[in-house]
Amino acid sequence: MAWCERQNSGANKYIPLRHGFLYLCAILDWATRKVLAWRLSNTLSSDFCTSALKEALTRHGKPEIFNTDQGSQFISAEFTQVLMDHGIQISMDGRGRCHDNIFVEGLWWTVKHERVYQRPCNDGIEQQRSLAQCFDWYNRRRPHQSLSWKAPDEAYFGTLAKAQPMAA
């Protein structure tokens, strides 16, 4: 895979339930907006974010740069060590610079307004199922204007196919 031009991003958002909330972490490919991995947790710790990061790296390879906000889970030794062990440059948003992570913020808006608020869940199990459907729809079927009206999967796999050397 040609990752030299890839930049991934990770961020957290809280997801409301009927009674309480959960934290959602997603790893996003900046170029194609594809959600590479995601996790839910009832605590804001680094372990569920690290788990999502490891899955993204295992399934999709390593990007050149990884961008996050300055949340404690992303500056933790556990999370940053995974990035350093893979030789990935770490980029963190500046304080008060919400536009640094604008692609993930767009994802959060979509997830909340096109799924979570329209289909409130009672518990974490129900929310896990709902978000699995949401991310499947988002990656496979939701067109993005910035991707010439392609869905993230179409843009992601098309980009990778073009980057692969032709078989002789």
Image: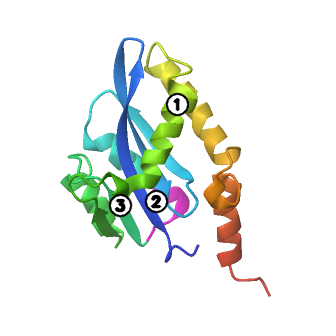
Residue 102 location in percent, x, y?
A: 42, 53
Task: Report the label total.
Answer: 3
Q: Amino acid at mark 3?
A: Asn
- Residue density around tag 2, few if under 14, some if 14–19, many if 20 or more, within 10 Å: some
Task: Tell me the residue at 41%/33% (across/down).
Answer: 40
Question: Mark 2 and mark 1 in contact (Cβ < 8 Å)?
Answer: no
The mark that comes first in sequence, 3 or 1, is 3
Q: Quadrant of the N terminus?
A: bottom right
Magenta segment's dominant SS is helix
Residue 124 location in percent, x, y?
A: 44, 21
Look at the numbered disc 3 and give the secondary structure of its residue. strand
* Residue range (magenta): 56-63
Q: CA distance from mark 3 to mark 1?
A: 24 Å
Examine the rendering and report whether any part of residue 54 can be seen. no
Q: Nearer the viewer, mark 2 or mark 3?
A: 3
Task: Tell me the residue at 46%/12% (across/down).
Answer: 122
Q: In this view of the protein, which residue sits in the foreground, 130 or 104?
A: 104
- Taking 164 as reference, is 43 above or below it? above
Q: What residue is disc 1 on?
A: 113
Q: Amino acid at mark 1?
A: His
The mark that comes first in sequence, 1 or 2, is 2
- Asked which quadrant contains residue 101, the reply is bottom left
Apparent side of residue 76 relative to residue 101 in the rendered image (left or right): left
- Taking 43 as reference, is 154 above or below it? below
Residue 140 location in percent, x, y?
A: 69, 46
Apparent side of residue 56 relative to residue 101 in the rendered image (left or right): right
Q: What residue is disc 3 on?
A: 67
Q: Nearer the viewer, mark 1 or mark 2?
A: 1
Q: What residue is disc 2 on?
A: 57
